[in-house]
Amino acid sequence: MSPYLQKSLPSALAALLVSTALPSYAETSPQPEKRAKVMERVTVIGNKDRKDEIPGSATIVNEETLDRYQFTDVHRALQEVPGVTVQEEDGYGLRPNIAIRGGRSNRSADITVMEDNILAAPAPYASPEAYYFPQMDRMQSLEVIKGTGAVKYGPRTTNGVLNMVTKPIPSKKQADIVAEAGAYETFRTGITAGSSFENYGLMLNAVHKETHGFKDIDFIGGDTGYDVQDVLGKFRVHSSPGAERYQELEIKMGYYDELSKETYVGLTEEDFNATPNRRYGASQLDNMDVGAWQAAATHFIELSDKYDLTTTLYHNYVDRAWYKLDSVRIAGVTRSLSAIFSDPVANAAYVAALQSPDTAGGTFAIRDNARKYFGQGVQTVLGTNYSLGETQNKLEIGTRLHRDEEDRFQRDDRFDMVDGQAVFTSIGAPGSAGNRVQSANAWSGFVENEIQWENWTVTPGLRFEYINLKRRDYGNADPTRAGTALTVFENDLLVWIPGAGATYALTDSWKIIGGVHKGFAPPGVPGTAGEAAFTKEEESLNYEFGTRYRQGEWAGEVIGFFNDYKNLLGRDTLSSGGGGTGDAFNGGEVHVMGVEATAQYDAARVAGFSERYRFPFTATYTLTHGEFKNNFVSTFEEWGTVSSGDELPYTPRHQLYISVALETDEWGVSLGSKFVDEMRTVAGSGAIPELQRIDSHVVVDIAAEYKINDRFSAFTTIENALDEEYVAARRPAGARPGMPLMAMAGVKISLW
């Protein structure tokens, strides 16, 4: 049996066993209206009708879109969402970089990331960078909400919220299998199986993915891809259909395992232009090993005809070790990777060492970035509908107790290259390159009331966050933590976050929308010295105003936004090209403004084609401009020396996405194309220096599917169909390529 089948069959067979073992007696799911109420509490938008009532920008990437393109990379799945900027890193989206409305994209740390309305980042308060991210294979839809809608969720309310909705327990017996294979020895197999019965339901989703990778390592060739397994299980018990007060308890458990041969080492401009998919031989030992576990229990009870209560207990745990090249030493002088690639001419000897098959004297330091994370808590929401005078109201009151922690225990080893092979010269002491624990305790709450009166819908809301941040430094002198000597830094804050939005229906088709709210992000865990020791929380005042249209086959909206930052935060991480201290930095006053536009229609209906054909068309456009409004000098890699008027890094001015498809009930062909304007990678103004510029580029994806019968269909996808060669990022060290042309073919089988 092939190694691929040995890895993928256990998870697939487990799910298949569940599906075949399900009882065969009559299946009944909970009452649809009850499930709709539960879903309203665990989603941030819900459905298309609910989306139109939200007083701000809201987008759903639905199940149909995810299935059409068979997205496995969340970056590509979010292409159609206006206001969203993604920064590719590895080409596969293993550690996404997602920004909303000009925020920092690095590790998606500037947005609130949730799965089923539960905080999903490993340590969202103490260390928000998401080095683990839920897999797209388990998702039914993606929801993005911006503006005043973000106040309800937190802790980050400035830019927006991404909520990933996992596949639900099916209402009847169901088992769906997907299998595909393609370029670079890439394989994926997955199965979703489950059913609902009179008083319970269950579901298991399992997927295995692996690829050899599209990059080649100097001297050894080798594997630069990944191997991932992801399993998600759900079990629900609920009241009988005739119960006076409906209740349900759903338990969700997940497991994730990843081994990826990823590196932070990019290429010089000259080497990228010659061979963009090359990797230097000195990066051959780099690899990431991640294990993640999650558990959640959500209880819903209908207290009365008007009141319901939803309570969720959750625990997430992530254990990761990223073994990757950190620095180069020549003649006793050490240079970080980011310093080398920021000026490769001045550091030509160091670049030559990265390219060389032979070095001596322990030239390379490779860091074992071993970290453990956990996040856990309990959250509850009381909801009610009531009338007051001539108004109809939907009121939600919620609270959350949360604790999370990041535990760093890192070391540096040294090696040389000998005949193109990495050979160790020394092993560092555990903890000698980073030995600290960062933790956060948070208590938050919100109240939001949606008021409907005649043509108006007004939604005021208020959130509070009480946060205790703590950092315990054990120091290199006591790497084993055997003693009690340590340095403790602590920070407490209480903040109130108000917001209000409104929609006014001009006609049955046209609505005017607008809102204003306070933006907030927690400060960094206190640092040891300098500006990082005095970081303040991020604050801003954010405005949006626009119009929304929906009639028949047409839908669209245009929204302008303006974010007025009193204090922008940045964070020193290795992934952003910094030293990896985790310290936060204040960037002072910043203005970000822009326009988001969306248009959707079915051209087949508009043109009067036969009902047999569907021709859906979607276009989204985003204009974003952000600039600093004060002068300062920072050691934060992306900012450096800043003058008033300098533009924000990693913020393209223009983005345009167009998707067209031709479909029938038996077959379909789809094309999606994304244009991203040039952007700078370091704050500045005027012409962008070559080594600080990502050029504009267009990436086209194609998908096709043919339904052979009710149970069997075949599909193919081509990512980057024009094989566009482009620099996707220059952080943390050197030019990194986007995914080249990637062709896949597969089948979907429905057993029931």
Image (cartoon, rainbow, N blue to C red):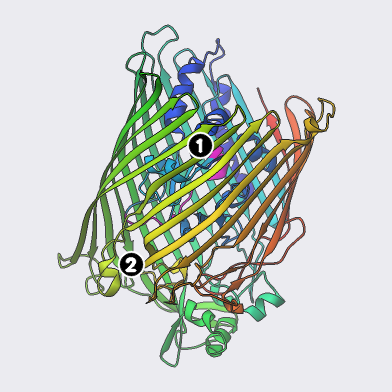
Query: Is residue 145 depicted above or below 652 in this figure?
Result: above
Query: Is residue 322 depicted above or below 601 in this figure?
Result: below
Instruction: Write down the residue under mark 1.
Output: 165
Q: Amino acid at mark 1?
A: Val
**Disc 1, SS:** strand
Q: Quadrant of residue 726?
A: bottom right
Residue name at image x 61 percent, y 78 percent: 690
The percent position of residue 150, horizontal first and vertical second, equals 42, 43
**As rendered, which of 89 and 368 lies closer to the eye?**
89
Find the residue positioned furthest to the left: 484
Instruction: Write down the residue under mark 2.
Output: 583
Q: How far apart are the alpha carbons under marks 1 and 2?
A: 32 Å
> Quick one: label 2, few (<14), some, or many (20+) residues within 10 Å?
many
**Disc 2, SS:** loop
Q: Amino acid at mark 2?
A: Asp
Residue name at image x 37 percent, y 8 percent: 244
- State the extent of the magenta-drawn residues as a range: 126-142
**As rendered, which of 393 and 187 lies closer to the eye?**
393
Query: Is residue 655 depicted above or below 13 in this figure?
Result: below
Residue name at image x 63 percent, y 73 percent: 220
